[in-house]
Amino acid sequence: MYDPLRHNSPGCGEKYPDSYWASVSGIDASVNSAVSSTSSGDDGQVTQDLEVDVVIIGAGYTGLSTALHLAKEHGIKAHVLEANQTAWGCSGRNAGFILKSSGRKAYSTMQKQWGEEVMRGVYHEMCEGVETVKNLIAQGIDCDQQAAGFIKVAHKPGMLKELIAQAKLQQTMFGYDVQILTEQDVRQQYMDDHNAYGAIRYQDGFGLNPLKLALGYQRLAREAGAKIHTSSPVIDWREESGKQILTTPKGEVKAQKVVIATNGYTPKGFHGLVKNRTLPVLSQIIVTQPLTDEQIAACNFLTSNVVMDTRALKYYYRKLPDNRILFGGRGAITGKGAEDPYFANRLLEVLKTSFPPLANIKYDYAWSGWICMALDDLPHIFQNEKNTIFYSMGYCGSGVSFSAQAGKRLAQKVAGKSVPNLPLYQKELPKFPFAPLRRVGQWGYFHYGKIKDNYF
C-alpha cells in the first residue's frame, strides 16, 4: 500500500480501494470512474501545457471545497490536480462521521493556552464547519445522510464520570445540548452494546456516505467553473520567474498560486513548506454482512447514530442504511502491513464482544486509509511569506466536516481576503522533533494506549 513516509508518489490513475463506499456510490468497476447522478464526472487527465491562476493539488474534501468556494465566492476558477481518482485518499475511505470537531485538542486546554475568546472562536469554526457541509448537501448532494445523533460511550464504568464532567463543561461553556445516558439507557434505547457502560449523546452529529459527499462537491465545483483533472500527479515542482510550474505525466501547469490539499496522502519530500509537519496514521474499517431482522432484534440495534468510545485507541461504529455494521479503529503502522488481515480480524473480534449475538457474523469489506496527525493536535491553514503557496493539513481523524470549512478559509486566503485571527489560520503546523523517528513514537503511543485502555 502507498505509504506517504516511504514513497515519493501515490501513483497515477490508481483505482479506488475495494471499499463498501466504492461499491455503493455509482462507481463503474470496469473503468473505476463516477457514472451515477452523484457526480457529473471529472475533466480527465492533463494532456497539454496549461497556464492558470490557481492550482490545487488533491481532489479530496479540502481541495474540492477550496475550488468550489474560489469559483462561487471569488470568481477564481482553479484547476485541481489529482494523482488518482477524486476522493481516492481519506475523503473516500473514512467512516462518514460529521461531528463538531477537528483535531484532538480539548477546549479546556485551548482556554488555558489561548484564553476564552480564542477558544470560543475555534469552537465557532468547528460549528460552522458542520453548517458548511449541511449547506453544500442542501444543494442537491445525495449522500445517504442518516438521522442526527452522536453517542460517545464509556468503555469502562469509571469513564462515565469523565463523560458526565465533559458534558457538564460543554453545557456550561457553550450551552451545548448533551444528554447523559446510563448503561441501561444505552442498551434499551439505542443498542445493546456489552462494552458500553453509559454514554453522552450529542444531538447534531450524523453519518453519511463520504465518497458520495466528495463526488457531490466535485459536481458543484465543476458547475461553478472549476476543472478537476484526475490521473495527473505532480511529479516535479519548480519556480521560474515568480511562477509555480508543476509537471504532470502529460503536461506542465503554470500557476500564480498553488494550494496543497493532500493532507495524510502528501508524498515523501513533496514540498519544503510541509516537510516533517505531519504524521500519517492508518485507520482500518470493516463493514459486515447485512444483519438479519433477528440479529438486529437480538442486539436491540435501534439506532443509526454514529458511535465512538472513550479508549485512547478508539473504536467507532454505526449501522448503515442496508443494516450492515461499519466498525473501525487503528490499523497497521506502515503501509507495508496495511493489507495484513490481522487488523480487520481484530476489529471483527472486538465487534463481537460488543454484540455477542453476532458471534458468527463475517465482514464483506475491509480497507484502510491514512489520516493526518499534527504535533499540536490541531489542523492548520497556512501559507508561505510570498502568499503563493498555501496548505491545510492535520485534521487528526476528525476532518470530514471541518475540511469543507478549511477549504472555504483557504479560498479566502488565496483571494487575498482576511480570515479569523485564530491559531488555526495564523500559525503554521509545528514540525515534529526527531521527524525520522515519528513512527517509533507512534509505536510507543499505541502500546501506551493499549495498556491505558485495558488497565487504567
Image: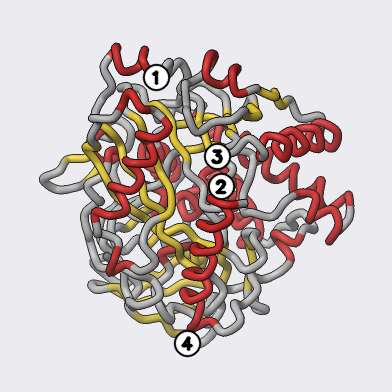
Q: CA distance from mark 2 to mark 4?
A: 50 Å
Disc 2 target residue? 311
Task: Tell me what residue is drawn at x 62 percent, y 68 percent.
Answer: 375
Q: Secondary structure at mark 2?
A: loop
Closer to the N terminus: mark 2 or mark 4?
4
Disc 4 target residue? 240
Disc 3 packing (10 Å; few <14; some 14–19; many ≥20): many
Tell me if label 3 and label 2 are in contact, CB under 8 Å.
Answer: yes
Q: CA distance from mark 1 to mark 3?
A: 18 Å
Q: CA distance from mark 4 to mark 3?
A: 51 Å
Looking at the image, which is closer to me, 2 or 171?
171
Tell me if label 4 and label 1 are in contact, CB under 8 Å.
Answer: no
Task: Tell me what residue is drawn at x 60 percent, y 17 percent.
Answer: 185
Camera-near label (4 vs 1) is 1
Task: Tell me what residue is drawn at x 89 percent, y 50 percent.
Answer: 116
Q: Quadrant of residue 205?
A: top right
Image spot of residue 430 (x, y percent):
65, 74
Amino acid type, label 2: Arg
Closer to the N terminus: mark 1 or mark 2?
1
* Residue 326 higher or lower than 395, as above or below: above
- Of the 4 image quadrants, the one containing the N terminus is bottom left
Disc 3 target residue? 309
Q: Residue furthest bottom?
A: 241
Amino acid type, label 4: Glu
Question: Seen in the image, is 261 located left or right of residue 74?
Answer: left
Question: Seen in the image, is 41 located left or right of residue 219?
Answer: left
Looking at the image, which is closer to me, 22 or 442?
442
Image spot of residue 376 (x, y percent):
67, 65
Disc 1 target residue? 299
* Residue 291 higher or lower than 151, as above or below: above
